[in-house]
Image: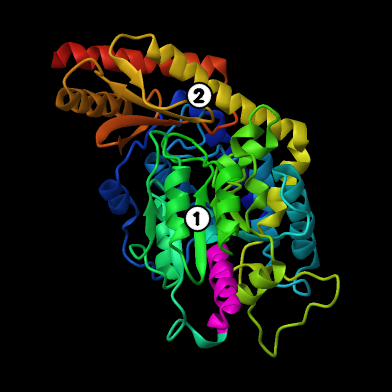
């Protein structure tokens, strides 16, 4: 079989999967144990024809795939992997480029340079920032906080990149009580500890309370990093950057913003006020595989001080070519040398949508979320637990019932929805109570899809309430 035939068959299977998303449930048809059993043949001793292996992969994998590309997938904050980005990603895999340095793959390095420039313009961040294309916001947070760790210690006279943390001055880390778990993971990976932080109280939307932040900052002496948030994972709320960042800067603190999805509010004229002042920070982490709709994996580590960024990340060896003036090695901004050429899909999505298309996409998702919240709130016993300003909606069922009963009804309604598969939404604990989280992040979620989703939610809720009350 020729390469062209093999690739054509793979592309045809991919297109068929995408074209039939509306005819299958928004849930896997096979669970993990069954999937392990399906894949679990003995180690092959002999080779197999490529077409047979491809057919087997498709038949075996598809029943255990979640419909994350579906228009009514509201679990977690997951973009729809737009066909344009997927097509570019097909080519990325076929081209087989290691995007570690500019000499190995000039095009891969160049497309990252241009895509990074476009990203800074879209997000309203300083033009001189450096950008590393990483796997996602988890590694983006790690990368930015590595730069922060190095810089605040260097200012205190300690070179952590050369000497490590043994004997280093302690770093105070201030973080909101409702920060995302991946930020705590990044602190753990960096040797700063996920529990050795000063947790700042938050309001009912998960935003840092400015007075509490100011009080905590007043007690800081020595190296300090503060972590703010654009887009709380349950409510979508953003910290008050305009008030908090100057307070942190007055004590010489490095300010990092975890903006996995919320930073994209910067691209919308109607929502930019939610992130006002965010450009004053020192570093920002965000994702492409959420609202930019690139395929997995794609995230961005953005740092104001390029030298601090490169000090923390650069990998050098005698066999690697050196970057000269005007050249950019992608691996100098990420914790990888061998790495996927993520810039192609990012460039393709921005080139396809343009600034206006991205703004329309962001506004459309936010309007869909607001529409769902408004329609659900009209039903007796359903309460919306957040101010819907971005794409996140938290829903409580049986809000007119005693708390424990409402918790149970919320869990039961989520379970019924997941079994039916008309949409997918997950649960969470918010302020000690059970809620359903709706994350509207897919470019296909329009008014018609919202209506289908609301209808399915109300059906499930009414049926479960009849059984429970």
Q: Residue at x 63, y 54 (%)?
A: 281
Q: Residue at x 65, y 30 (%)?
A: 361
The secondary structure type at the circle numbered 1 is strand
Residue to which mark 2 is pinned: 369
Q: What stretch is highlighted in magenta?
A: 142-161
Name the residue nearer the viewer: 137 or 29: 137
Does any portion of residue 46 appear in the rendered image?
no
Query: Considering only order in the chain, which callout, 2 or 1, is on the residue closer to the N terminus?
Result: 1
Residue to which mark 1 is pinned: 227
User: Magenta part mainly helix, strand or loop?
Assistant: helix
> Alpha carbon of mark 1 to alpha carbon of mark 2: how far?
27 Å
Q: Where is residue 290 in the image (x, y as percent from the top left)?
A: 56, 42
Name the residue nearer the viewer: 300 or 125: 125
Q: Furthest-right residue in view?
A: 326
Question: For the residue carrying disc 2, how many other residues have a C-alpha within 10 Å: few (<14), some (14-19), or many (20+)?
Answer: many
Question: For the residue carrying disc 1, how many other residues have a C-alpha within 10 Å: few (<14), some (14-19), or many (20+)?
Answer: many
The quarter of the picture where the C terminus appears is top left
Q: Residue at x 23, y 13 (%)?
A: 463
């Amino acid at each position: 079989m020729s390469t062209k035939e093999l690739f054509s068959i793979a592309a045809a299977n991919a297109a068929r999967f995408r074209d039939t998303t509306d005819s299958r449930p928004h849930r896997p048809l096979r669970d993990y144990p069954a999937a392990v059993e399906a894949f679990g043949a003995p180690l092959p001793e002999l080779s197999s024809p490529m077409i047979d292996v491809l057919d087997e992969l498709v038949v075996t994998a598809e029943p255990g795939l979640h419909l994350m590309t579906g228009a009514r997938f509201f679990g977690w904050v997951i973009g729809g992997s737009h066909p344009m980005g997927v097509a570019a990603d097909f080519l990325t895999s076929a081209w087989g480029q290691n995007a570690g340095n500019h000499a190995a793959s000039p095009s891969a390095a160049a497309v990252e340079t241009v895509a990074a420039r476009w990203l800074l313009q879209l997000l309203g961040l300083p033009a001189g920032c450096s950008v590393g294309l990483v796997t996602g916001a988890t590694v983006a947070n790690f990368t930015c906080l590595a730069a922060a760790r190095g810089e605040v210690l260097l200012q205190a006279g300690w070179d952590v990149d050369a000497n490590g943390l043994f004997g280093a001055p302690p770093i105070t880390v201030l973080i909101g009580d409702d920060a995302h778990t991946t930020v705590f993971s990044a602190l753990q990976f960096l040797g700063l500890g996920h529990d050795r932080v000063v947790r700042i109280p938050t309001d009912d939307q998960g935003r840092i309370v400015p007075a509490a932040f100011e009080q905590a900052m007043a007690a800081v002496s020595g190296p300090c990093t503060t972590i703010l948030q654009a887009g709380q994972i349950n409510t979508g709320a953003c910290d008050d950057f305009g008030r908090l960042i100057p307070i942190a800067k007055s004590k010489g603190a490095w300010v990092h913003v975890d903006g996995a999805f919320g930073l994209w509010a910067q691209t919308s004229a109607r929502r930019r006020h939610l992130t006002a002042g965010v450009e004053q920070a020192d570093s920002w982490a965000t994702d492409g595989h959420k609202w930019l709709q690139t395929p997995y994996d794609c995230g961005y580590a953005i740092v104001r001080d390029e030298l601090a960024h490169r000090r923390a990340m650069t990998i050098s060896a005698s066999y690697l070519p050196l970057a000269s003036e005007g050249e950019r090695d992608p691996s100098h901004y990420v914790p990888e040398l061998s790495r996927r050429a993520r810039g192609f899909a990012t460039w393709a999505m921005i080139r396809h949508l343009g600034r206006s298309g991205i703004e329309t996409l962001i506004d459309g998702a936010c309007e869909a979320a607001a529409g769902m919240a408004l329609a659900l709130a009209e039903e007796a016993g359903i309460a919306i637990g957040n101010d819907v300003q971005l794409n996140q909606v938290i829903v409580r069922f049986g809000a007119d019932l005693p708390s424990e009963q409402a918790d149970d009804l919320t869990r039961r309604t989520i379970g019924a929805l997941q079994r039916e598969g008309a949409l997918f939404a997950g649960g969470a604990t918010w302020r000690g109570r059970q809620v359903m989280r709706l994350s509207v992040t897919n470019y296909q979620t329009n008014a018609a899809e919202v209506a289908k989703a609301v209808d399915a939610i109300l059906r499930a809720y009414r049926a479960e309430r009849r059984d429970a009350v």
